[in-house]
């Protein structure tokens, strides 16, 4: 089990796929990191030597912002937008799509479960 940037990456997967389990590293950055470390992307994590793991750790620590630091940075950016009163900050506050997507339909992920409009069903007549 390799531990990189505080994350235990899966040992059965190929290195280029396993690196994407780290927050802030996607497929493109994973291939860039492996090229800089001179590691074959298709090798399994369990087959990496200790020196190769160390090279990966050093490259990620020095050149990339990942995990907690990156999450803190993103949270602070969103908080700043809210404090300034920017349009994007208001959208974040309201829980609506931020980047100009349509909201008349297809915004369920941000808006949550749809709420039915009240008064559409008639009450059942009670027996007296």
Image: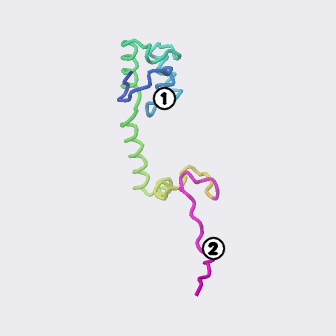
Give the dominant element type of the magenta stretch: helix, strand or loop: loop
Image quarter for residue 69? top left
Per the image, label 2 sits on a secondary structure element best described as: loop
- Circle nearer the viewer, 1 or 2: 2
Query: Height in image: 67 above or below 60?
Result: below
Farthest residue toward the bottom?
Answer: 128
Percent position of residue 111, x then y: 54, 56
Residue 105 is left or right of residue 71, and the answer is: right
* Residue 114 within the segment the image draws in magenta: yes
* Residue 3 in the image: above or below residue 106: above
Nearest the viewer among 32 and 21 is 21
Numbered label attached to residue 121: 2
Where is 17 relative to 55, above or below? below
- Looking at the picture, tell me which residue is in the foreground, 103 or 18: 18
Mark 2 Cα shell of 10 Å, populated few (<14), some (14-19), many (≥20): few
**Which of the marked residues, 1 or 2, is nearer the chain's N terminus?**
1
Residue 42, x across and y down, in percent: 53, 16
Q: Confirm or deny contact between disc 1 and disc 2 (CB under 8 A).
A: no
Q: Position of residue 95 (x, y in %)?
A: 49, 56
Where residue 20 is drawn, which disc sits there? 1
Residue at 48% across, 57% down: 90
Residue 31's mark?
Answer: none
Range shown magenta: 104-128
Label 1 CA crowd tier, 10 Å (few <14, some 14–19, many 20+): some
Which residue is painted at 39% across and 17% down in the image?
53
Question: Magenta segment: does it hold 127?
Answer: yes
On screen, residue 107 versus residue 22, left or right, reads right
Q: CA distance from mark 1 to mark 2?
A: 49 Å
């Amino acid at each position: 089990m390799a531990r990189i940037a505080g994350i235990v990456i899966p040992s059965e997967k190929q290195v280029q796929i396993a690196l994407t389990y780290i927050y802030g590293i996607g497929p493109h950055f994973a291939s860039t990191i492996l090229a800089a470390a001179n590691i074959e992307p298709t090798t399994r994590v369990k087959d990496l030597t200790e020196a190769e793991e160390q090279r990966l750790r050093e490259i990620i620590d020095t050149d990339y912002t990942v995990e907690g630091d990156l999450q803190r940075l993103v949270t602070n950016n969103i908080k700043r937008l809210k404090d300034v009163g920017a349009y994007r900050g208001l959208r974040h506050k309201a829980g609506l799509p931020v980047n100009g997507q349509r909201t008349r339909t297809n915004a369920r992920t941000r808006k949550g479960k749809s709420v039915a409009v009240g008064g559409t069903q008639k009450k059942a007549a009670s027996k007296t």
